[in-house]
Structures are given as C-alpha cells and as structure tokens.
Amino acid sequence: MRVSLDQPDTFVKSQTLTRDAFLGGRLTVSQPRNGFRAGLDSVLLGAAVCPAAESLLDLGAGVGTASLVALAHERGLGAVLVDRDAGMLALAMANAETNGVGDQVRTVALDVTAAGAERQSAGLKPDSFSAVIANPPFFDAAAGTRAGEPARARARHMAAGDLDLWVRAAAAAAAPGGEIIFVYPAAGLAPLLAAFSQRFGAVTILPLSPRSSEPASRVLLRGTKGSRAPMTLLATRALHIAGRDFTPEFEAIFRGQARLDW
C-alpha cells in the first residue's frame, strides 16, 4: 500500500519527487512524480523473498522499493541494487539511508542485459546471491505506444528477446540452491515461463487477480537454481474482496505485517 506524503523535492535533471509511505508507514520512499512509480508489484516482490535469504540481488531496482521491503522484513539481509539509470540508483541509496539500511545496500549502474564479462567487471560475481528478484519491463518496444516520458519508457519497454537475457543474468548471479523471483503481467507468462524452465527447477507460479471473479492480471514466478523438482501451479489469489478493499492476506502484506506465503 502506498500513501503519498506530498513532499516534493528536486533531484538530478530537476525531477520533482514525492515521498511515499509503504508497509503502513514503516518505509518512506522518494520517487519521481512522473514516470514509472513503484507500487503493489514492488511490495509483493519484496515480500516474496524467502526469510532464509542472506544476500539479495535486485535487477532493475529503480528507487529500491522491492529491496527495501525485503530488508524491512529481514534486517540481516544484504542487498545489491542494479539499474542502468544512475540517477535512480542515487535515489535508491538515499532511500536506503533514510530507512536506516544504507550500510546493507550497494548499488551497481549496469544494464541487466549486458554481457557476462561486463556484469562481472561491475562487481556482480556469479553464483553469489541466495535470492535474485526482478520486475522487468513488460512491453515489447516494437509493439504498441511507448510512454512519452523517457524514464517511464525505459522502465516499461524492452526489445524482443531481452526478457530471456534478464533471466539469464539472474541465473548467472544466483548461488546454487538460490531462488529467483520475477513479478510480471499474466499476459507475458509464456516467454517468462519458457526462460525459467530452461534454467531452473521447482518453478512455482502464483497467479494474482484483482478480484475472485476476474482473470489473473499478474504472476509471481519463482525458480530454484540447480533444482530438479517439478513445476507447481498455485491457485489464483485475489487481491481485493470488493471495491478497493484488500483481502486480509494482502492487507497484512501491504501493511508490513506479513510476508507472502507461497
């Protein structure tokens, strides 16, 4: 759950920021007023991380909301945030410091689709992270209408084939036995599942729908590096009871009172 605190500020490129409260006020996150904004997907992604995780890699981290959610649940966790937008990473580090976890966060300015040698040169050692999370861009750059604001366009659009490169980067960085978790629109499940199935075992799919009478609109996908366990398709879970009210399960998650149990 995000609540705007309406405290504008300026950042690089004279961006106007808002300060938004997450997890019932436990987190305060500054992010650009215009462009891609963290919301429910970021909270779900951070809340989906296994409590046993010791090291976290956040690919396409933006302002760091998903990682901050994970850190709010597990203060012993260390996180590396990767994004190609250095300005967003500076804001992510400022958010980490504001929330008292600056010493647990490191940022890396890098395109997730970069070659393995470039990732390693940037300090992303292979087979290193017990958890890797991502909320990748979800529209094919060659299809539809691109967002007018450049940062929003970069966050929402990717070239054909780049989704597989994101999964490849996650697979390279994860430690043996590590978990990889992506949140993605349900309409894009097929290519994401194909990319996961080629590299991971114990693939778990959690479809999420706005309401019980509606089809799934997003999915959480989790895989385990090195596992040979079969795939599990979980029952669809509805976010809302009726109107804008969340179900008790998701109300607790969005208020920071519970992790995602899946």
Image (cartoon, rainbow, N blue to C red):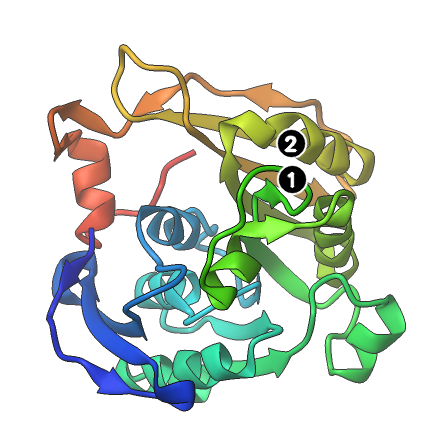
Disc 2 target residue: 203
Residue in the picture at 26% in, 77% down: 17
The answer for how far apart the CA atoms under marks 2 and 1 are is: 4 Å
Disc 1 target residue: 223
Amino acid type shown at disc 1 = Gly
Q: Is 255 left, or right, of 214 in this rendering?
A: left
Q: Pick whichever, 218 or 99, lies toward us.
A: 218
Residue 136 in sight: no
Badge 1 density bin: few <14, some 14–19, many ≥20, Cα 10 Å? many
Q: How far from the left and from the top, in percent, is residue 128?
A: 71, 68
Badge 2 density bin: few <14, some 14–19, many ≥20, Cα 10 Å? many
Q: How far from the left and from the top, in percent, is residue 228?
A: 78, 31
Amino acid type shown at disc 2 = Val
Quadrant of the rendering where the C terminus is positioned: top left
Rendering quarter of residue 190: top right
The answer to which of marks 2 and 1 sits earlier in the sequence is 2
Q: Pick whichever, 230 or 210, lies toward us.
A: 210
Residue 1 in sight: yes
Instruction: Name above or below for residue 29 compared with residue 247.
Output: below
Rendering quarter of residue 31: bottom left
- Determine contact: label 2, label 1, CB under 8 Å: yes
Q: Is 166 left, or right, of 253 in this rendering?
A: right
Residue in the picture at 53% in, 66% down: 54
Q: How far from the left and from the top, in percent, is residue 234?
A: 48, 20
Marker count (numbered): 2
Q: How far from the left and from the top, in percent, is residue 144?
A: 57, 38
Q: Mark number for residue 64?
A: none
Q: Element at badge 2? A: strand
